[in-house]
């Protein structure tokens, strides 16, 4: 088995973190860069990731996250927040960034920009928000993969009240909404679930070749 697959088998949704252990600044930066490099539809990355270190704020988030202790016991708490009602402004920002990064005239990208806008404009606001939220799951996938390579634990969470997290972080005023939580750190020796065998479908049951 490759090292990558071994690390994937090692990874699990940690239930109890060791609150005395902290992820180093170097490892955190590696995680941030892996998230930054994640794929997204059209490359738009319609989200922001908030890294919550403030203990009082994390305690407040815990109360609206079903009381899950990982929120406060983990080394860091990441909040993935997707853009609300994405539109032309975000596309224009992406095109400007592409122009600068690739050193090409912004006018040469007008066709692609219009193509993206033509896809987004007909969508309802609800459809736009669902689409933007889905992109955060791609970024979460990269987080899980790089964290496993670093032997850092992550507990991805959908179990929280988005409206309450939005209120605590002021996300509504920024035009974003919380879609995922990701406490990360190191498993506690007392977390019994780390010893459980990973339960997944077999390849025969999961894959269909046509």
Image: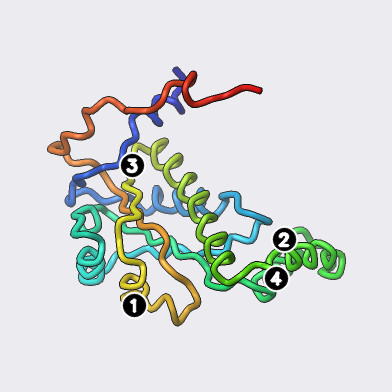
Q: CA distance from mark 3 to mark 4?
A: 40 Å
Label 1 packing within 10 angstroms: few (<14), some (14-19), many (20+):
few
Label whose residue precedes the other's in the sequence (1 or 4): 4
State the image coordinates of residue 72 (x, y, percent, origin top left): 21, 59
Q: CA distance from mark 1 to mark 3?
A: 29 Å
Q: Nearer the viewer, mark 2 or mark 4?
A: 4
Which quadrant holds residue 97?
A: bottom right
Which quadrant holds residue 103?
A: bottom right
Q: Nearer the viewer, mark 1 or mark 3?
A: 1
Residue at image position (36%, 67%) is 162
Label whose residue precedes the other's in the sequence (1 or 3): 3
Residue 167, numbered label:
1
Q: CA distance from mark 1 to mark 4?
A: 28 Å
Mark 3 and 4 residues: CB-CB less than 8 Å, in contact?
A: no
Mark 1 and 3 residues: CB-CB less than 8 Å, in contact?
A: no
Label whose residue precedes the other's in the sequence (2 or 4): 2
Label whose residue precedes the other's in the sequence (2 or 1): 2
Mark 3 and 2 residues: CB-CB less than 8 Å, in contact?
A: no
Residue at image position (49%, 65%) is 82
Which quadrant holds residue 85?
A: bottom right
Q: From the image, which quarter does the N terminus lie in?
A: top left
Q: Nearer the viewer, mark 2 or mark 1?
A: 1
Q: Which type of secondary structure does the marked residue at label 1 adopt?
A: helix
Label whose residue precedes the other's in the sequence (3 or 4): 4
Residue lying at the far right in this picture: please name it. Answer: 108
Residue 101, numbered label:
2
């Amino acid at each position: 088995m490759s090292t990558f697959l071994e690390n994937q088998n090692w990874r699990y949704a940690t239930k109890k973190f060791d609150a005395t252990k902290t992820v180093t600044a170097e490892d955190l930066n590696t995680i941030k860069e892996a998230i930054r490099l994640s794929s997204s539809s059209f490359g738009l990355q319609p989200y922001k990731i908030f890294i919550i270190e403030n203990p009082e704020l994390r305690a407040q988030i815990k109360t609206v996250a079903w009381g899950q202790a990982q929120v406060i016991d983990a080394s860091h708490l990441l909040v993935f927040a997707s853009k609300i009602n994405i539109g032309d402004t975000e596309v224009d920002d992406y095109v400007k960034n592409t122009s600068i990064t690739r050193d090409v005239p912004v006018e040469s990208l007008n066709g692609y920009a219009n193509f993206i806008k033509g896809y987004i404009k007909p969508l309802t606001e609800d459809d736009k928000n669902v689409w933007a939220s889905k992109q955060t799951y791609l970024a979460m996938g990269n987080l899980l993969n790089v964290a496993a390579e670093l032997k850092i634990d992550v507990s991805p969470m959908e179990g929280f009240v988005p409206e309450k997290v939005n209120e605590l972080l002021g996300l509504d005023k920024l035009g974003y909404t919380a879609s995922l939580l990701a406490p990360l750190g190191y498993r506690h020796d007392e977390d019994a679930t780390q010893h459980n065998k990973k339960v997944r479908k077999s390849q025969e049951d999961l894959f269909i070749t046509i």
